[in-house]
Image (cartoon, rainbow, N blue to C red):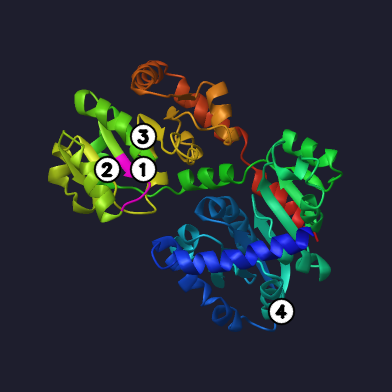
Amino acid sequence: MYNTVYNIAMCLMVLTIKFCALFKKKMYYREKGSKQVWRKLSIADKTTKYIWIHAASLGEFEQGRPVVEAIKEKNPEAKILLTFFSPSGYEICKNYPLADIVCYLPIDTPRNARRFINAIQIEKAIFVKYEFWRNILSELKKREIPTYLISSTFRKNQLFFSPCGISHRKVLNCFTHIFVQNESSKNLLQKININNVTISGDTRFDRVVKIAQNAKQFPLIRIFAESQNVLVAGSTWEKDEKIIIKHFNKNHSQKLIIAPHEISKHRLEVLCSKIKRPYVKYSEATEENVAQADCLVIDGFGLLSSIYQYGSLAYIGGGFGVGIHNTLEAAVWKIPIIFGPNYQKAEEAKDLIACGGAISVTNLEEYKKALTQLLNEKNAGEQAGIYVQQYAGSTDLIMNLIFRD
């Protein structure tokens, strides 16, 4: 019964994406990219096996990326297949140089699952964090292909752990091994007799440490930030900006670097219209105008993780919406962090608050107090940096277990 319901849901998903593609840009990209999957797989080298890495979106790819890099470092000749479900991951990473093939994951119908795995020889499959595609995972298990889940977290309110989740949890038995971020996740899995589990932490710690070690340098941003109190606001949404910009417009003792989550022309126009102090977009920056500006608007992708190095402290966006973005990218630079109230699903955010490296705020007044507190607390940024370094090393543990042969 469960399989039938699931397969009907997958067929409905196909139709929904086709319909939404008519008027939603993300779904249009997904539908367009899906049509290229079989052509891309047809060029796979039939004489060798591929290591398959699947990430739902860009955030999950950042967790899987350290493992891909470690695989290629261990064996430069290894063939990598990289798949995504979301356009926000695929569109940015479709030319990722360490992958031999990058494509969308087809919708998980039984036919697609068989066709996908028939199209390419898979040595091992590695899924990142939250991907439980029942037909594909069942097909991998049926063919005895080692399959792993990495950097995963589990919560007691998930369907796996409810009395009516017995059929749903069968998908977990398809994994050869599951690598979880924390002990509570391991305990939850053991309660439902899933024992092939290792606490390995989060590979994002390794990723941000490596980024910091090989950070890009931005001479223009250095000129903008030199000897100044600078707030770097990363991956912001409009609700974040309502607080940040309102305070910034009246607080002339602090400069602002702001990198909105979306950088469409309209989105940037709306953002810039709210800034009342001198600003410049990064794409238009020169030595002269950045020296005169109080605000630098980042209107390009792939820069933020290295830009945090120029900040006195950071604000991480998303906390007034579905959830905060990556706090570790800022914490690794030993700067204190502020974010909105919706951070409960981010273990690292809770840990940063506990160690004194971050503060969560719900309104403008709390934001003002947090700024003052963190700027006066000289040890806050240091604690954030120590926290990141303390939990690095997840990638080595995963690699040693998956590739121990």
Mark closest to the chain's N terminus, 3 or 4: 4
Q: Quadrant of residue 247?
A: top left
Q: Quadrant of residue 161?
A: top right
Residue 112 numbered mark, or none: none
Q: Secondary structure at mark 4?
A: helix
Mark closest to the chain's N terminus, 1 or 3: 3
Picture coordinates of residue 393 (x, y %)?
Answer: 65, 43
Circles 4 and 1: CB atoms closer than 8 Å: no
Question: In the image, is residue 376 part of the stretch drawn in magenta?
Answer: no
Residue assigned mark 4: 118
The alpha-carbon separation of the residues under discs 4 and 2 comes to 49 Å
The alpha-carbon separation of the residues under discs 1 and 3 comes to 19 Å
Q: Residues within 10 Å of mark 1 (few under 14, many from 20)?
A: many
Picture coordinates of residue 198 (x, y %)?
Answer: 77, 44
Mark closest to the chain's N terminus, 4 or 2: 4
The three-letter code of the residue at mark 2 reads: Ile
The three-letter code of the residue at mark 3 reads: Asp
Residue 98 visible within the image? no
The alpha-carbon separation of the residues under discs 4 and 1 comes to 43 Å
Q: Nearer the viewer, residue 361 or 375?
A: 361
The alpha-carbon separation of the residues under discs 2 and 3 comes to 22 Å
Residue assigned mark 1: 307
Circles 1 and 2: CB atoms closer than 8 Å: yes
The three-letter code of the residue at mark 1 reads: Ile
Circles 3 and 4: CB atoms closer than 8 Å: no
Give the residue at the far right of this rendering: 193
The three-letter code of the residue at mark 4 reads: Asn
Q: Is residue 93 above or below residue 400?
A: below
Circles 2 and 3: CB atoms closer than 8 Å: no
Residue assigned mark 3: 240
Residue 221 numbered mark, or none: 2
